[in-house]
Structures are given as C-alpha cells and as structure tokens.
Amino acid sequence: MQQTLIILKPSTVQRGLVGEVIDRFQKKGLIIAGIKMMQLGDEILREHYAHLVDKPFFPSLLKSMQATPVIVMCLRGVDVVEVVRAMIGATNSRKAAPGTIRGDYGMSGQENIVHASDSPENAEIEVRRFFAPGEIFDYSPVTLSATYAADELK
Ligand code: IDP
Ligand code: MG
C-alpha cells in the first residue's frame, strides 16, 4: 500500500490542533504506520526544503519549522499521496478551499498547518529521511475490509 510523509508544523503544535488534524486523517480511513515528535535541525530542513533554499522566505521558513518540536507521521492508503494532497489544499491557507485542512485551520502561506509529500517517489525519500526502518509498522487494521472493496486493495 502506498505511503506518505506528513509533518504537523510548529504552528499546529502551538495552536493545539494536533489532535484535530490527526483525527481527520484517521476518519478518512488512512492508516498510521509511524508517528513521533522531533525537533528539526538545520541539516534535515535544508535537505527537506532543498527546492526552496534560494527563496527570500527560506530563513523565515527555517525559523518557523524550528519554533517547537513537530509531529511527523507516515500514513498509508491506496493512492494516499494524491488523497492527502487533496485533503490539505493549496499551499497558501488563505487560498485553500474551505473543507481542506489548510482552508479550515489556517490563515497563512507559511504557517500552513501541515506538510505532505507531493509524489509517491518523494514520499519514499521523505519517509526514509524522518523515520528509521524500525519506526514504521506494517499491520492490517481489522477495519480494512470495511474501508475498501477487496479489488481495491493491491
Ligand atoms: P507545499 O507545502 O504545499 O508542498 P512548497 O512549495 O513545497 O508547498 O513549500 C514548502 C513550504 O514552504 C510551504 O508549505 C510553506 O510553509 C512555505 N512556503 C512556500 N511558499 C511560500 C511563500 O511564498 N512565502 C512563505 N512561505 C512559503
Ligand atoms: Mg512541497
């Protein structure tokens, strides 16, 4: 089953929204394969946001992502990368559609609640970046057969 890497950002931790955001992913039917709290250092953030290091807002992003520890999660589901990107909405929370996580909980482009992998290839790299192999668990919840039709489970 496909997996994706989620980060609940420091603004989400500080605003007390961790439970609500995790609840939305769980109610959708996604499986938590890994979850932990960690304080992100410069090195991992420069790697994770390598596509943004030359942007003028990068120093501000770096500081924001280090303001408190974050919650990192590995979620599993069929087509989970695309499903979660649709659930979180546009990068700028003010433009994200109502009903999406950023659209419902955020007002900022930078402080936009959550990170989610943008492709299955990047998801594999990002899960390995934030989790040791022993921290990711392969199990089948008993609810799986009520969540998917048999032919949808590859
Ligand atoms: P994404 O998080 O929707 O995938 P990216 O373009 O990968 O968006 O940007 C990574 C993160 O960098 C965003 O989630 C946001 O926190 C921050 N960011 C992106 N663009 C801007 C900007 O124009 N101003 C401030 N922060 C930004
Ligand atoms: Mg991105």
Image (tube, rainbow, N blue to C red):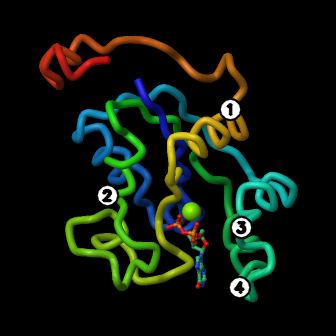
Q: Residues within 10 Å of mark 4 (few under 14, many from 20)?
A: few
In what element is the residue under mark 1?
loop
Indicate whether 48 appears above or below 65.
above
Residue pointed to by mark 4? 57
Locate residue 58, reporting x and y percent: 75, 78
Is the residue indicated by label 3 positioned so its CB lies within 8 Å of ligand 1?
A: yes
Are dots 3 and 4 in contact, CB under 8 Å? no
Which residue is at a point 68% across and 32% down the rendered structure image?
131
Q: Amino acid at mark 4?
A: Phe
Q: Quadrant of the C terminus?
A: top left
**Distance between mark 2 and mark 3 Cα atoms:** 21 Å
Residue annotated with mark 3 = 51
Residue type at mark 3: give it: His
Judged by depth in the image, the label closer to the viewer, 3 or 1, is 3
Which label belongs to residue 131? 1
The residue singled out by tag 2 in the image is: 86
Image position of 48 (left or right of 32): right
Instruction: Tell me which amino acid carries mark 1.
Output: Phe
Q: Nearer the viewer, mark 3 or mark 4?
A: 3
Identify the element where label 2 is drawn.
Answer: helix
Give the crowd class for mark 2: few <14, some 14-19, many >=20 residues within 10 Å: few
- Residue pictured at 32% horizontal, 43% vertical: 25
Sequence-wise, which precedes: disc 4 or disc 2?
4
Q: Earlier in the sequence, mark 2 or mark 1?
A: 2
